[in-house]
Image: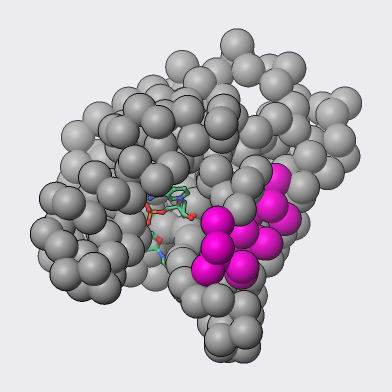
């Protein structure tokens, strides 16, 4: 379905981004990988994605640095010949109440989770327009639709990303470029494992008990969504069936935001 397309997935060395990279590769897209990790781990990630019979590129561009974001888009065009699909996935979390939230943590979360998405879209759109086709998929969150205490910067960034998605969709509405958002609930990735470990330590409970508590608080299915499921939704949004899906946000959250 995506044979010959070039996909750039930010933050794709682990978790949801890697799940999306594999799902796009399974449809034939060549993938530009990005994110942190040691050389061995990144070599393994590349091999895993290439197992689908596609080419990969890799860049360690840091989404906290605006110049790196633009350079990442250009590196994708240089290495894979285009940027047909852009998945803005890199993200970080910081948990603290507003009156104790460090100013630099606020800036970092907003830059990586929101501003870098604006910067990558800004850099990628001219390339998509030139080729007359494009898919932009922004990985927002259930926290793009509802809030939780302690996550002011993350919730503000993800709500902002849902808004940015709508604007880009309107500006590209008369073209074959679409822009949509995915809003996952809890997915068991390193980002969430850190929150489980913190909860277990704070309450003096086991990791398994902390996992169960995290899920029962927000996610009625009491099961994690998986990177593979998020990848499946991203691949669908890149398919012809999704040609007229524009500016939408898709919950994949075990019922979290249905409450
Ligand atoms: P993760 O920590 O497993 O992976 C994050 C990826 O981003 C990694 O590849 C990491 O190297 C990369 N990354 C981090 N900072 C970066 C930076 N400055 N520059 C470039 N790459 C950077 O996290 P995840 O859970 O897979 O999260 C991926 C996205 O999904 C994030 O935007 C997150 O907000 C969102 N999300 C996650 C969940 C969840 O439950 N895990 C739920 C909703 C939304």
Say which residue appears at 87% left-offset and 39% top-offset: 171
- Against 187, is 193 above or below? below
Residue positioned most to the top: 241
**Residue 17 lies within the magenta run:** no
Say which residue appears at 44% left-offset and 42% top-offset: 218
| Span highlighted in magenta in the image | 148-162
In the rendered image, residue 16, in percent from the top left (x then y), is placed at 37, 45
Residue 209, can we see it?
yes
Scheme of colours in the image: one colour
Total number of numbered discs in the rendering:
0
- Against 245, is 118 above or below? below
Q: Is residue 181 left or right of residue 50?
A: right
Quadrant for residue 20, please give it: top left
Between 163 and 96, the residue placed more toward the observer is 96
Residue 83, can we see it?
no
Say which residue appears at 88% left-offset and 26% top-offset: 174
**Residue 159 lies within the magenta run:** yes
Between 90 and 226, the residue placed more toward the observer is 226
In the rendered image, residue 66, in percent from the top left (x then y), is placed at 63, 75
What predominant SS class does the magenta segment belong to? helix
Quadrant for residue 110, please give it: bottom right
Say which residue appears at 86% left-offset and 35% top-offset: 170
In the rendered image, residue 203, in percent from the top left (x then y), is placed at 24, 68
Q: Is residue 1 left or right of residue 53?
A: right
In the rendered image, residue 27, in percent from the top left (x then y), is placed at 39, 23
Q: Is residue 173 left or right of residue 184?
A: right
Q: Quadrant of ligand 1?
A: bottom left
State which quarter of the image contains the C terminus. top right
């Amino acid at each position: 379905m995506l044979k010959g397309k070039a996909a750039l997935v930010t933050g794709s060395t682990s978790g949801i981004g890697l799940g999306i990279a594999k799902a796009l590769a399974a449809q034939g897209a060549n993938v530009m990988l990005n994110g942190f990790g040691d050389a061995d781990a990144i070599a393994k990630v590349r091999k895993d994605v290439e197992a689908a019979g596609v080419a990969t590129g890799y860049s360690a561009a840091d989404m906290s640095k605006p110049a790196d974001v633009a350079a990442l888009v250009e590196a994708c065009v240089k290495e894979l010949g285009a940027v047909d699909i852009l998945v803005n996935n890199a993200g970080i979390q910081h948990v603290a109440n507003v009156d104790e939230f460090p100013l630099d943590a606020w800036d970092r979360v907003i830059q990586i989770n929101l501003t870098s998405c604006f910067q990558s879209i800004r850099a990628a759109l001219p390339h998509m327009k030139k080729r007359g086709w494009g898919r932009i998929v922004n990985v927002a969150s259930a926290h793009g639709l509802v809030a939780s205490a302690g996550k002011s910067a993350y919730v503000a960034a993800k709500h902002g990303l849902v808004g940015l998605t709508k604007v880009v969709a309107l500006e590209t509405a008369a073209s074959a470029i679409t822009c949509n958002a995915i809003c996952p609930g809890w997915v068991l990735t390193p980002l969430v494992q850190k929150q489980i470990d913190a909860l277990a330590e704070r309450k003096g409970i086991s990791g398994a008990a902390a996992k169960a508590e995290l899920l029962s608080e927000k996610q009625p299915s009491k099961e994690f969504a998986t990177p593979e499921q998020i990848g499946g939704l991203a691949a669908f949004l890149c398919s012809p069936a999704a040609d007229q899906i524009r500016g939408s946000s898709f919950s994949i959250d075990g019922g979290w935001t249905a409450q």
